[in-house]
């Protein structure tokens, strides 16, 4: 599962602060340190760690390739956020997480950033397929696919980033200019809905193909990263960067 | 009816514990033993046993072939959970149950596991058809078909396991990236709904054909298991394994 | 109207018991006898008898042919429940009832039983049409048609008994395997809805044709039964059997 | 507007009894007489008389032709209920009423009775069109058209009286045979809805044409009845019969 | 904006009486006079006058042509209600109003009256277009178009005044004749909805063309009326009639 | 983001007054001055200024070009409101705002004013695309696209300003003329919905093309304005006018 270390709402922040205080107390510290906050954030965002949980060897290997897939694609693409941490310690309902951290707070997200984030989301599923074959792909990619679909819909429906449906929005009506509020739940036609679906489908297929191309070309790095993950269970950003050295594409290459 | 000995929610567990305590008390025991828990689980999951209920001979035979059908298909396919118990003692609204038990707790479910579980679910209906003819098939398969349809929809709509609709999700919108929550109940178009239906239909037809092939090839084992069931009413996993010895496919055969 | 002497829910049963107690009291009996229960059941299921109600001669004749039509078709088909009673004493909103009683409690219902029950339901309307001509058919068949349509939909949508749509279920989604509940009220496409309609329509047309064939071939028996009904108003199962002697098809004939 | 002197629910009956008591009291009578009940019924069914309301001459003439149209068609067709009263005294929102009274209480309604009731309902609008031309037809037929459409839908959707959609019902699902309640508001497909519309449309067109044929053939009687209505404002059944003597079709003519 | 001096509900009438009492009090009168009621009616129906509001010269001229357009078309067509008053004093959200007053209380509305009322409603928008060009038409016609569309839908869907969809009603089902209430929100098919739209569109286009023909033919009168309106701001019915003398079509011309 | 300094509701006004009082108090003034109101309005309409927020250089440049795009298109088109202020100080969720101020209060909005406002709304996105390339366009245009789509829908659906769908309204039914309220949420057909979508799409494409033509022709002015914005962060209307001198189209040119 690919996740971001940002985007928490006010409610989440209070929750995280409380968790951090508990963690600090458990460690007999009176003050919350940075590490407490990180642990608290991960727990609130995805669920508690389940170290006691024994995964069978096949699942562990699959989970490692899945996370390594996210990490490789995300590292290589020049407009993706840097990898912050990769882990195959189960947490909540997922068997592993690849964390990305934005280097600075941003106001906007560009079309190319959307595309590369999508490819990164597909990295997990595609790695499973490349390594174990289509019949062995798992439900582990369910959350990634859901997020990817939502992103592609947002591109087409909210920010006008479709190929044919460009610079248009497709939302519920806010009510008219001068008269009564219109309450139709979907103002556009079925034909427009079909066009939206076609755009969304194209965007997803293109991103999935991009992930496949990258992982095929970098299969050796993928194996290497997986091996390290199986050995150490958790790798931080620097360790990942070291392993994947020399693969990052220059930013201009895709502009 | 095919059922799993897993998947209970917290509420069910409390329920099961209470039932087990009652069963223990009825047997003048102060402590709950394993057997009490098993009985309690089966009662909560499917309903109370109805031993007093007399089934006519035709229904008993049909029910035995139905359960044997589940058991044979489930046993033969290499990625299915092992058979835990087969019974034709009526319970709740069903005339019999084949219980499967996962050998270990899993995080993920693979495409091949979905496919084989589906074939197992079809084993009951297909056995009825093979033995008694299409016109004598019964409503006894209603619950199995419902579960099978839900599984196939999950494969296509949630975890991207369709043949054409691969690596995509089809769910209600969660709200957009930056703006207001969109509240459309079905964001995709009618044409996409048709494509989803076609995928679901293909998956179900393929699984049903798989069950038919297995049961035709193993008709003698099916008859043998049915006979034993009619004689003993309940068979445990070891008894089933003994009867079906030599039929299990090697796991690699379908990879 | 064709009805079954089964299928009462718990609430109905309490209702029936109370009615039976009232009937016993009215007859100065302290204990409820079997006859009280039968009367109570019929009153609760369809409404009070309306003996005081005068039917004109044309309606009486039409009602007699309608009920005789149910009885003849139901008697002849080998997998139908036996006729328990036929009456043209108005009750509730109906001008007559043909009661069928299952010989034993069943867990399942087979495809052939569905088909023959449907043909029996059509017996009333078809008898009206054969005897009085299409323009004189009445609203008296409304309830029968509604029940028939529900049965055909259940066959196709719930228990996989369609011809093309076989071994599939078409129901609202229960929620997915691992993620959020999906709340779509109709998960399948319009095209699938068309296919379901075509199956339902075929099943109904076939059953209606079956009733027509039987009643044409047995017109003399139909007339005879009607005549007796007009004379005696109510006939029990044995009287019906005596009149229809020699018409029952052997069970194997349709297997 | 065409109306029937039947069909009141329990709530209406209490209402009518109260109105009758008030009318009796207004006339210094302590007992309700038959005439009080009739007046009360008409008031509750359609609204209070508005004698004070002055209609202009054009509207009075149009209203008289409209009601005479209902009366002529209803009188001529052999399976219609007899005309009870025709009036052009405004009542509630209508400028006139033609009352029909069923000669006896009926349990069923036949296909031919539906057809002739529909033709009678169209009698008002068609009379307006024949006499004043299409551009002068009025909203006065709105209620008649609404009732006619409901009747035609009932024929096709509830009692199986369509031409192609025969002996089938099209209603919301009641829930399935054995499993959960299905809550779809319209279980059948769009294509079936089109077929239903086509049947409804045909039935209405045929009934409208029937009314047109009758009124063209009997234009002289229509004029005569209208003239009498304009002179006397209200005509009872016997007066209508006298004027329309010799036009009634024999019942067998349309069987 | 075109408006009628009728159609107030009970609630509105109480509102109007209160407003009239306030106006009388403001003028130091203890009794409400006719003029108070008229002012109160206009305020309740459309909103308070906004004399203080300064309109720029372009908007004043556009508003004058718009209202003159309504008045000219309404005056010329023989079946329209007479013009009661035309004003370009802003009131509520509108920059001007043309009031029509029915000469007598009517029970019905004929097809020709619908058509001419529609043409009158289009008079405002068409005048803007003729005088200032399509690109300068304004939102000032929004309310007129809304009312016109509702009227055309009523013609086709409620009172059977379409060209092809004649003498039929298209409303939500009231429930069936004998059985349960059907709760479908739109009983007819999509194809029927298309046919209704086509009829509505034709009716509106024809009325709009009628307004255009009249205003082109009477451009000089339109200019003259506009000029007077700009000078005096409000014209009563007699002033309008004087200016438009000689343009009224004879009623028979369109029958 | 393009915004107007008008259109506040009553609730907003109270809110603005309170904010202004707070701003005055913060500045140790007892009376609210004009500047306080302006600041309060901007805060309530879009959110608080975020001066502390550091934007990276790329985002600052993109934001400057985006706002300059709005300003250039809005300034050049003759029927647009004058530019009041342009700023790239982040506020609420946006990285910059271009304020337009209507020179006088208007009752109506013309077709040409709609068109030019749309082109202005597209100015931001188009500027991003021209300068940085399609792949670098951002979510910054999301709000502009949403407003543009709503305006185009209003043109077509409420005020009859489509090209083919002219002088018609498409709204939920208000209920019929004489009978019951119809409660259909969308009275028109799917085909009409398609026609509406095609009109909306055409209007948006035309406006977007208009913005592109203007910005290509005036690229030098766009660069100049952006440069000044990057230097000064906020420019008032006079500064903008000075930079864009000589580009404004004469009003007659597009009439």
Image (cartoon, coloured by chain):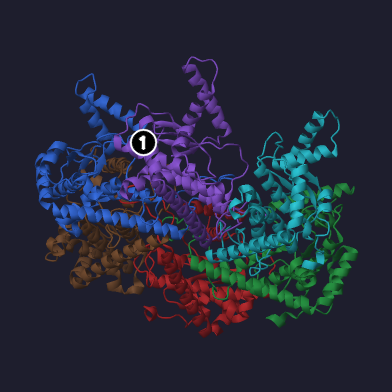
Chain colours: A red, B green, C cyan, D purple, E blue, F brown
Q: Is residue C224 left or right of residue B202?
A: right
User: Which residue was labeled with disc 1?
Assistant: D227
What percent of the width, then of the height, locates residue A241?
Answer: 50, 77
What percent of the width, then of the height, locates residue F101?
Answer: 21, 52
Q: Nearer the viewer, residue A9 or B131?
A: B131
What percent of the width, then of the height, locates residue C160?
Answer: 68, 65
**Residue E51 in view, yes or no:** yes
Q: Is residue A183 left or right of residue F81?
A: right
- Mark 1 lies on a secondary structure that is helix
Q: Quadrant of residue B207?
A: bottom right
Q: Chain of mark 1?
A: D
Q: Nearer the viewer, residue B28 or F161?
A: F161
Q: Residues within 10 Å of mark 1 (few under 14, many from 20)?
A: some
Q: Nearer the viewer, residue F129 or C42?
A: C42
Q: Nearer the viewer, residue E120 or A187?
A: E120
Residue located at (22% from left, 71% from top): F213
**Residue C86 in view, yes or no:** no
Residue located at (50% from left, 43% from top): D248
Residue located at (23% from left, 66% from top): F226
Q: Please, is residue B143 above or below residue B119 in the view?
A: above
Q: Is residue A221 left or right of residue E90?
A: right
Q: Please, is residue A149 above or below residue B164 in the view?
A: above
């Amino acid at each position: 599962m690919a996740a971001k270390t940002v985007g928490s709402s006010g409610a989440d922040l209070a929750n995280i602060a409380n968790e951090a205080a508990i963690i600090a107390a458990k460690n007999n510290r009176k003050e919350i340190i940075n590490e407490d906050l990180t642990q608290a954030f991960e727990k609130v965002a995805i669920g508690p760690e389940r170290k006691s949980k024994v995964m069978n060897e096949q699942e562990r290997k699959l989970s490692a390739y899945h996370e390594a897939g996210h990490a490789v694609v995300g590292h290589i693409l020049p407009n993706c956020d840097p990898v912050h941490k990769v882990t195959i310690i189960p947490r909540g309902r997922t068997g592993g997480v690849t964390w990305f951290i934005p280097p600075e707070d941003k106001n906007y997200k560009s079309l190319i950033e959307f595309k590369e984030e999508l490819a990164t989301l597909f990295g997990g599923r595609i790695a499973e397929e490349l390594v174990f074959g289509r019949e062995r792909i798992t439900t582990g990619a369910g959350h990634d696919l859901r997020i990817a679909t939502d992103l592609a819909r947002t591109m087409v429906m909210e920010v006008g980033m479709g190929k044919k449906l460009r610079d248009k929005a497709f939302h519920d009506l806010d009510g008219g200019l001068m008269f009564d509020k219109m309450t139709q739940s979907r103002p556009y036609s079925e034909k427009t809905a079909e066009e939206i679906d076609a755009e969304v489908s194209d965007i997803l297929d293109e991103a999935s193909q991009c992930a496949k191309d990258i992982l095929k070309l970098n299969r050796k790095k993928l194996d290497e990263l997986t091996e390290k993950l199986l050995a150490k269970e958790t790798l931080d950003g620097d360790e990942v960067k070291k392993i994947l050295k020399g693969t990052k594409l220059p930013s201009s290459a895709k502009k």
